[in-house]
């Protein structure tokens, strides 16, 4: 682990972020938390005496919740991976090049896996594919 990393502070920040994300996840609607909008859920919506605009609003809200849930789940995975790297002594090192991730970056994004250069490269590759 790079010498510049304050392990206690990093763990506290990651655990706080984990708790925050769990809270967000818990606040989402039941259908989104279950991960799907199945046919039964859609049928329930259409069977009610709802105006088509109300149905559209309901669908939009559920899709929005599912999108938020996907992002929260991804962020939770990143935080959990960072906690594991912390336990293994690999926290603070770029997973691509092995160089130390600057402390300023870790303070802004404690779950960071890559240095700025490798993060930019990964994002470019993701956009290209």
Image (spheres, rainbow, N blue to C red):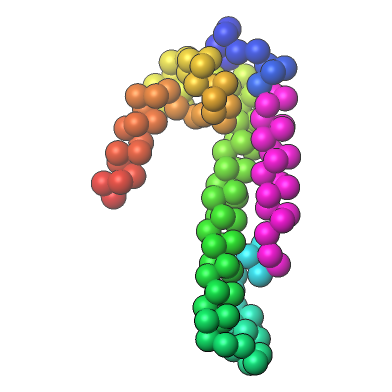
Instruction: Specify whether 102 is left or right of 5.
Output: left
Magenta range? 11-30
Q: Is residue 93 visible?
A: no
Q: Is residue 95 above or below residue 23?
A: above
Instruction: Specify whether 124 is left or right of 21.
Output: left
- Locate residue 16, reporting x and y percent: 71, 32
Q: Is residue 112 above or below residue 123?
A: above
**Residue 111 part of the magenta segment:** no
Please tell me which residue is depicted at 64% across the width and 80% down the height of the picture: 41
Please tell me which residue is depicted at 30% across the width and 46% down the height of the picture: 127
Q: Is residue 30 visible?
A: yes
Instruction: Give the number of callouts.
Output: 0
**Residue 29 part of the magenta segment:** yes
Q: Magenta: predominant secondary structure element? A: helix
In which image quadrant can residue 88 be found? top right
Please tell me which residue is depicted at 68% across the width and 52% down the height of the picture: 25
Image quarter of the N terminus: top right
Q: Is residue 87 above or below residue 129?
A: above
- Locate residue 55, reporting x and y percent: 56, 81
Please tell me which residue is depicted at 70% across the width and 40% down the height of the picture: 20
Viewer-proximal residue among 93 and 13: 13
């Amino acid at each position: 682990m790079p010498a510049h990393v304050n392990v206690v502070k990093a763990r506290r920040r990651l655990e706080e972020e984990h708790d925050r994300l769990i809270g967000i996840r818990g606040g989402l609607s039941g259908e989104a938390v279950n991960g799907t909008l199945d046919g039964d859920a859609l049928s329930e919506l259409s069977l009610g005496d709802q105006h088509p605009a109300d149905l559209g609003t309901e669908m939009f809200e559920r899709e929005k919740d599912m999108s938020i849930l996907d992002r929260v789940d991804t962020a939770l995975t990143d935080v959990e991976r960072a906690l594991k790297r912390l336990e293994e002594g690999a926290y603070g090192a770029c997973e691509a090049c092995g160089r130390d991730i600057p402390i300023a970056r870790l303070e802004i994004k404690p779950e960071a896996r890559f240095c700025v250069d490798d993060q930019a490269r990964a994002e470019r590759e993701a956009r290209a594919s």
